[in-house]
Image (spheres, rainbow, N blue to C red):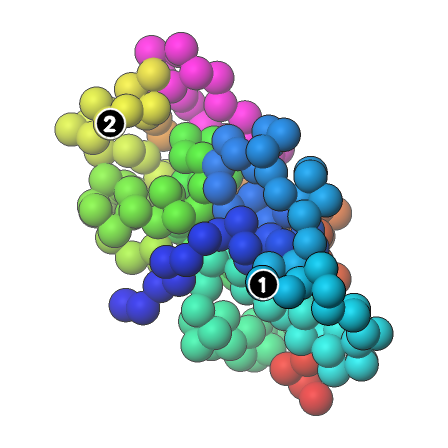
Amino acid sequence: MARYTGAVCKLCRRETVKLFLKGDRCYSDKCPIEKGASLPGKNAKKTRIRKLSTYGVRLREKQKLRKYYGLLEKQFKNLFEKAEKKKGVTGENFLELLERRLDNIVYRFGITKSRAHARQLVLHSHILVNGKKVNIPSYQVDINDVIEIKEKSGNIENIKEIKEGKIEVSFPSWLEFDSEKLKGKIIKFPSKEELNLPVEEKLVVEYYSR
């Protein structure tokens, strides 16, 4: 499957906000956003920043959210269409479906430094869901589904240190995770406020509903 392979810091610079795509670098002084970096491009500093149209504002929010979760446009739009068909508020449904992706849950457990790394673990069959191997990053995890690292995969660097207690993991209150057993689950679906995303999802809904 096609995947963006360029410099991920460039994506944050384009959206002028941290999307946390680079792991530890995002939390250090090396982060371009922390340095006040300009838009990417050879003549970015010379380019006059124009006021965005209504369409432009909605587009940028959509791109920001898509890049935040590391999805391609087709994947992103398909998930939005599923959110539209569900009962309730479309924007909140959409965020819930994005958060329920298996690669995102693995990332939220704090055992990987980025969603890209979490996606790699899933694709390489290191993750079990309810005791069964699942190698599909987009797999939708449900409440009380048990997600764990395969026993044979416990020697992977970083994961081994987490299991031995050398690295302390942090995860949101809507998740439960045992770092010794490398096993966790969703306790409840998160609210919009608990996610604290750098995006206004209503604008994304307006973009696709235009």
Quadrant placement of the C terminus: bottom right
Q: Residue furthest left?
A: 152
* Residue 171 in magenta stretch: yes
Secondary-structure class at tag 1: loop
Amino acid type, label 2: Ile
Q: Which residue is mark 1?
A: 41
Tag 1 near tag 2, CB within 8 Å: no
State the image coordinates of residue 162 (x, y, percent, origin top left). Answer: 38, 19
Within 10 Å of the Cα at label 1, are there few (<14), some (14-19), or many (20+) other Cα atoms? few
Q: In this rendering, is residue 83 above or below 112?
A: below
Say which quarter of the image contains residue 150.
top left
Which numbered disc flags the more N-terminal residue, 1 or 2? Answer: 1
Say which quarter of the image contains residue 38.
bottom right
Q: Residue furthest bottom?
A: 210
Q: How many marks?
A: 2
Q: Where residue 79 is drawn, which disc sits there?
A: none
Q: Where residue 156 is drawn, which disc sits there?
A: 2
Foreground mark, 1 or 2, reads 1
> Is residue 195 visible in the rendered structure shown here?
no
Write the start and end of the magenta stretch as one range.
Answer: 162-180
Amino acid type, label 1: Gly
